[in-house]
Image: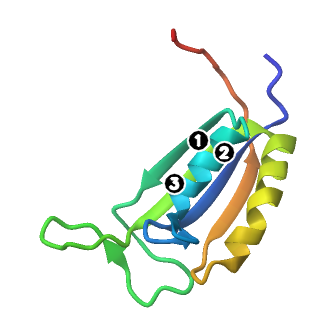
């Protein structure tokens, strides 16, 4: 299988970040699905901070915090992810909170679809 042009696009943000009235991670996942991105997963961290954070945010059973780190990861062909990023970049730049976006090449060893 030829996979040299596949990439992973990662967006690091917070569970409370929003685009307009929508949660950032929900907005991104729904838009990615509409754009035919091959796969997207959202990971919620148990502890972390960003460049502009004043505190380390963590999830402990005795704390009721909802502000936790989140990573949105999507995999597809490089040109598809670059086009998707170009589409969402203006919205990310308008957010009052910070985020980090990275893209890197990956090698896919197995891509097996399940039964529908």
- Which comes sooner in the sequence, label 1 or label 3? 3
Quarter of the image for residue 93 reads bottom right
Quarter of the image for residue 39 reads top right
Residue 24 x, y percent position in the rendering? 55, 63
Labels 2, 1: front one: 2
Name the residue nearer the viewer: 92 or 78.
92
Q: Is residue 109 above or below residue 56?
A: above
Q: Report the Cα–Cα distance between label 2 and label 1.
A: 8 Å
Q: Please give the residue where the numbered disc 1 appears in the rendered image.
A: 40
Q: Residue furthest bottom?
A: 54
Q: Residue furthest left?
A: 62
Please tell me whether mark 2 sits on a helix, a strand or a loop.
helix
Please tell me whether mark 1 sits on a helix, a strand or a loop.
strand
Q: Residues within 10 Å of mark 2 (few under 14, many from 20)?
A: some
Please tell me whether mark 3 sits on a helix, a strand or a loop.
helix
Q: Residue at x 83, y 31 (%)?
A: 4
Q: Residue at x 52, y 70 (%)?
A: 21
- Which comes sooner in the sequence, label 3 or label 2? 3
Would residue 47 be seen by someone viewing this image from the given angle? yes
Q: Which mark is residue 79?
A: none
Labels 1, 3: front one: 3
Q: Please give the residue where the numbered disc 2 appears in the rendered image.
A: 32
Q: Is residue 11 above or below residue 35?
A: below
């Amino acid at each position: 299988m030829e996979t040299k042009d596949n990439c992973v696009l990662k967006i690091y943000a917070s569970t409370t970040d929003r685009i307009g009235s929508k949660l950032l991670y929900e907005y991104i996942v729904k838009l990615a699905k509409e754009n035919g991105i091959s796969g997207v997963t959202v990971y919620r961290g148990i502890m972390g901070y960003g460049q502009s954070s004043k505190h380390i945010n963590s999830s402990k059973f005795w704390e009721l915090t909802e502000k936790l780190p989140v990573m949105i990861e999507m995999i597809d062909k490089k040109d598809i992810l670059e086009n998707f990023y170009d589409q969402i970049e203006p919205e990310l730049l308008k957010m009052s909170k910070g985020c980090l976006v990275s893209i890197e090449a990956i090698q896919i060893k197995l891509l097996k679809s399940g039964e529908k």
